Structure formats: C-alpha cells, structure tokens
Image (cartoon, rainbow, N blue to C red):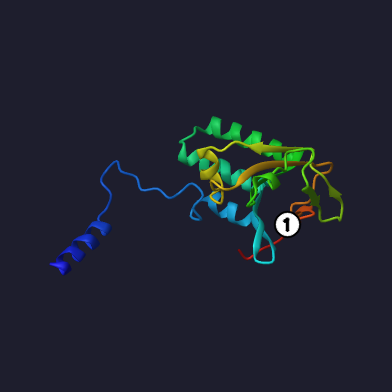
C-alpha cells in the first residue's frame, strides 16, 4: 500500500498543470531578473558583544541595474503594458541618477537602539565612494510594515525595522563605481561593501 501511495505522489508531482493554472516562483526568486539583481546588490552585516547580538542588518543598493530588474519583473508579474512599464522605468532611472539610495533592514534586541531616523540616534550613516569621498544621508526614512516590502526584500521579518537612506549624488559615477555603506556608533560598526562579490 505504501508503495502505491508513493507512486501516486510522484505522478501527481510530475503531472502538468491544468490549462489556465500558472505555477510561479516568488517575486524575488533567483530565477527572476529581480531576484538575481537583488542577490548581487544586497549585503549583510552582524555585530556582537561577546556572545550577545547587538545588531543584524541587511542593505540593498537600489542601483540602476537593480531598478531595471525590478521594472522587468514587475512588468511581467503585473502584466503591465509597454507604456506603463516604460513610465515606471523612466521614474526609477531618474531616481537613480539623482541620488544614492539604499533599503536597510535592521534587527536589534532592544527597539530603543533601532532608531536611525531620529535626530539624536547613536548611529551614524556614512557612504564611501570609490574616489575616497564620503558623505552623510540627506534623508533617512523609517518605513511602515507592509506586505509589498516582504515581497521585494525577503530578508525583512517581523523583528526588523526598515529604512530608506538617501545620499546626494553630486557627480555621475562611472558604470563600475561601487559604494561602501557604513553604520557606525558606540555600539560598533556595520559595513556593507557593494564591490564585486561571488554571492
């Protein structure tokens, strides 16, 4: 009996989907353009005091390449028309030209130390560019929890807080320019190097 049931399970798994039934991967699955770009443009860092966790963080650089992939996957999933997809693409690339932008999710055991958006936060965000210049964000926005964020950034969890960090882009960098994002303070340093990676 067990052999028969096992055979039925295998046959069911191999059976083609019925007409009109679509089997899709997650939005950020590595098989999608956006999933591959997200993997390439996301870094993580952890901070400990002895055996105690101080902070765990993930940062995604919203580069032109990531935005292009986001548009491509969004257009495919939402069946956007050419005009709507092109408008979305133009808006995303315009935002990329104007500023360096990062999506950051942070977990800290104490909510009181997860407050990047506050003027009196003990964290300091710094962006280092390939030419050695450094700058601080012109805007830090704490993001509300929503389902869309979990879809686009799978590392987000109920225990993380999310932020958008925006740094001024005074000159147009070369196509190979890769920044380094730092979060520093009395707790220690979280470093996100967006240079070439084999991840």
Q: Which residue is farthest left? A: 1
The answer to whether 119 is drawn above or below residue 198 in the figure is above
**Quadrant where the N terminus lies?**
bottom left
- Count of picture labels: 1
Q: Which residue is farthest bottom? A: 3
Q: Secondary structure at mark 1?
A: strand
The answer to whether 145 is drawn above or below residue 59 in the figure is above
User: Which of 190/164 is in front?
Assistant: 190
Task: Give x and y (percent) for residue 174.
Answer: 78, 51
Label 1 environment density (alpha carbons within 10 Å; few <14, some 14–19, many ≥20): some
The answer to whether 166 is drawn above or below residue 131 in the figure is above
Task: Give x and y (percent) for residue 16.
Answer: 27, 53
Residue at 16% x, 68% y: name it.
Answer: 2
Residue at 40% x, 48% y: name it.
Answer: 24
Task: Give x and y (percent) for residue 117.
Answer: 72, 39
| Residue under label 1 | 190
User: Which of 81/34 is in front?
Assistant: 34
Residue at 80% x, 49% y: name it.
Answer: 126
User: Which of 40/126 is in front?
Assistant: 126
Task: Give x and y (percent) for residue 122.
Answer: 78, 47
Residue at 59% x, 56% y: name it.
Answer: 39
**Quadrant where the C terminus lies?**
bottom right
Q: Is residue 53 left or right of residue 4?
A: right
């Amino acid at each position: 009996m067990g052999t028969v049931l096992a055979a039925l399970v295998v046959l069911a798994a191999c059976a083609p989907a019925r007409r009109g039934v679509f089997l899709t991967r997650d939005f950020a699955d590595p098989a999608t353009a956006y999933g591959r770009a997200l993997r390439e443009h996301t870094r993580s860092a952890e901070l400990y005091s002895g055996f105690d966790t101080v902070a765990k963080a993930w940062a995604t650089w919203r580069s032109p390449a990531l935005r292009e992939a986001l548009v491509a996957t969004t257009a495919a999933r939402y069946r956007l028309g050419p005009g709507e997809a092109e408008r979305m693409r133009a808006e995303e690339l315009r935002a990329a030209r104007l500023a360096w932008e990062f999506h950051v999710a942070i977990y800290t055991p104490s909510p009181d130390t997860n407050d990047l958006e506050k003027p009196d936060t003990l964290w300091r965000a710094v962006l280092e560019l390939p030419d050695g210049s450094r700058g601080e964000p012109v805007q830090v926005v704490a993001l509300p929890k929503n389902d869309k964020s979990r879809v686009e950034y799978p590392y987000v969890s109920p225990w993380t807080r999310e932020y958008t960090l925006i740094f001024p882009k005074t000159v147009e960098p070369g196509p190979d320019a890769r920044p380094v994002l730092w979060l520093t303070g009395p707790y220690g340093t979280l470093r996100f190097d967006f240079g070439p990676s084999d991840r």
